[in-house]
């Protein structure tokens, strides 16, 4: 998302969000929240709600079908499969956002897709 859309993006667990980064949440802040559909769903939901309570937009990638689900994914019947369907939704969202922002997701400006390590 950083490279293809040229926007600042960070990754945090729900515990990390509630430990610090939640203070950044306000009306100018947006979060894309991956609901794991497992025992940690409650803490992820709490982190997303904490951001919403501060005025931020928290969009969820989830199979729960609730109003706060921004990128719905199909239920897969097992929590270990959920990340696979979520990442497909995330990549489609990122490509669409890049195009909307006038960026080329297949050839990000200033980025080589192939690197050489010596």
Image (tube, rainbow, N blue to C red):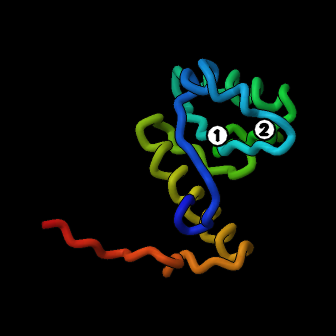
Of residue 59 and residue 62, the one placed in the foreground of this image is 59
Would you call the spot at circle 1 few (<14 residues within 10 Å), some (14-19), or many (20 or more)? many
Q: Is residue 90 above or below residue 61?
A: below
Residue at (53% x, 30% y) in the render: 13
Q: Position of residue 108 (x, y in %)?
A: 52, 76
Q: Earlier in the sequence, mark 2 or mark 1?
A: 1
Task: Give the vertical position of 89 relative to 107 (above or below).
Answer: above
Q: Residue at x 70, y 21 (%)?
A: 46
Place residue 66 in its image quadrant: top right
Q: Position of residue 112 (x, y in %)?
A: 38, 76
The residue lying at 60 percent from left, 36 percent from top is 35
As drawn, 104 above or below 59: below
Q: Secondary structure at mark 1?
A: strand
Name which residue lies at 53% across and 41% down. 11
Residue 14: image location, x then y, percent: 58, 26
Res 100 → quadrant: bottom right
On residue 66, which mark appears? 2
**Which residue is the site of mark 1?**
33
User: Nearer the viewer's eye, disc 2 or disc 1?
Assistant: 1
- Label 2, residues with CA under 10 Å away: few <14, some 14-19, many ≥20: few
- Is 77 or 2 nearer to us in this picture? 2
The answer to whether 91 is drawn above or below residue 37 in the figure is below
Where's residue 19, x and y in %?
60, 18
- In the rendered structure, the answer to whether residue 88 lies left or right of residue 117 reads right
Side of 37 where 55 appears, left or right: right
């Amino acid at each position: 998302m950083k490279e293809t859309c040229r926007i600042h993006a960070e990754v945090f667990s729900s515990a990390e969000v509630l430990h610090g980064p939640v203070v950044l949440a306000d009306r100018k802040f947006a979060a894309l929240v991956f609901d794991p559909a497992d025992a940690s769903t409650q803490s992820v939901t709490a982190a997303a709600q904490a951001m919403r309570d501060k005025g931020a937009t928290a969009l969820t990638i989830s199979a729960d079908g609730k109003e706060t689900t921004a990128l719905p994914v199909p239920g897969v019947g097992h929590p270990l499969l959920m990340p696979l369907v979520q990442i497909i939704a995330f990549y489609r969202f990122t490509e669409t956002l890049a195009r909307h922002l006038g960026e080329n997701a297949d050839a990000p400006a200033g980025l080589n897709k192939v690197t050489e390590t010596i």
